[in-house]
Amino acid sequence: MEKLTLIKVGGKIVEEEDTLCQLLNDFAAIEGHKVLVHGGGRSATQLASRLGIESQMVNGRRITDEEMLKVVTMVYGGLVNKSIVARLQALDVNALGLTGADMNLMRSDKRPVAEVDYGFVGDVKAVNGELLAALIGQGIVPVLAPLTHDKQGHLLNTNADTIAGEAAKALAHHFEVTLVFCFEKKGVLRDAQDDESVIPEINREGFHQYVADGIIQGGMIPKLENAYEAIDAGVKRVVITQASEIHQGRGTVVL
């Protein structure tokens, strides 16, 4: 099986000129097949504020009403996605920007209302891995925005970590996939105050123990749960690292 690297980067990295420039240079240098999944939350919040639309977050998730859906579509599917594509083309990477609606790539159901009504937020139900693999096989580098659709004519705001995990699972039938989650730390830390205390490898048993001991907490728990779901679905390797380290192969490897 040919190898494929799928990189997921948060909005913070793609929204600052220095970090974006370094990231795209490092991404361009990755050999073989590759996919980039991006966020863009801070840009969406800033644009919404300029338009007089209030941003509401619950547990780190954005409440997406009709007006906010327009904003995230403009920012994620437009400004951020196409800026990345243009800059990758300048680095001789033949990138193609896509949302889940393009070519029916990723279909979601609108999240049911429970304690919180998240509005137009999607939970992924189907990924067209065959089509994505066919594009990649032609030398195209997909750049995926965190938007999906319900096949009823509605776009849905969808968590970028979820997009990355679901795309990686679907592509694992066609490639040997390494999934890399990039964020602002060098990996999963033993001590949140010490940036150098990276845990180099975590197995499932160790993960549960770290959670029980309070070493791993907050937003890192769903990240690692996503990582194990991906491995269970056939993804070869999951790495959690800093964006500036993607070319070095450093960070936390999930076993």
Image (spheres, helix red, strand yellow):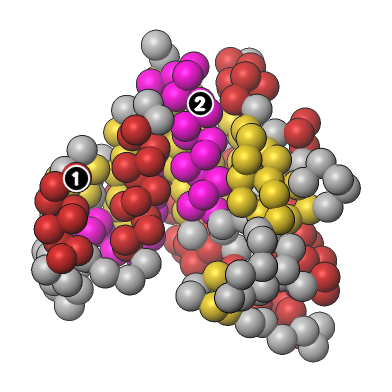
Task: Work out whether mark 1 precedes mark 2 in sequence or the reverse, and give the earlier one.
Answer: 2
Quadrant location of residue 229?
top left
What mark, if any, has residue 204 been given in the picture?
A: 1
Q: Is residue 116 left or right of residue 164?
A: right
- How crowded is the residue under tag 1: few (<14 C-alpha within 10 Å), some, or many (20+)? few
Q: Residue at x 82, y 66 (%)?
A: 70
For marks 1 and 2, give the CA distance. Answer: 23 Å
* Secondary element at image label 1: helix
Residue 117 x/y as whole percent = 67, 73
Q: Amino acid at mark 2?
A: Leu
Looking at the picture, tell me which residue is in the foreground, 228 or 99: 228
Is 21 situated above or below 105?
A: below
Is 243 situated above or below 63?
A: above
Residue 201 x/y as whole percent = 15, 45
Residue underneath mark 2:
171
Check the picture and name the quadrant holding the N terminus. Answer: top left
What residue span does the magenta drawing correspond to? 160-189
Q: Amino acid at mark 1?
A: Arg
Residue 46 x/y as whole percent = 67, 79
Residue 30 is at least partly visible in this image: no
Looking at the picture, tell me which residue is in the foreground, 179 or 139: 179
Q: Is residue 11 left or right of residue 23?
A: right
Residue 210 is at least partly visible in this image: yes
Q: Residue at x 33, y 71 (%)?
A: 218
Residue 132 x/y as whole percent = 63, 26
Q: Residue at x 17, y 77 (%)?
A: 193
Q: Is residue 227 left or right of residue 81?
A: left
Q: How many marks?
A: 2
Residue furthest toward the top? Answer: 1
Disc 1 vs disc 2: Cβ atoms closer than 8 Å? Answer: no
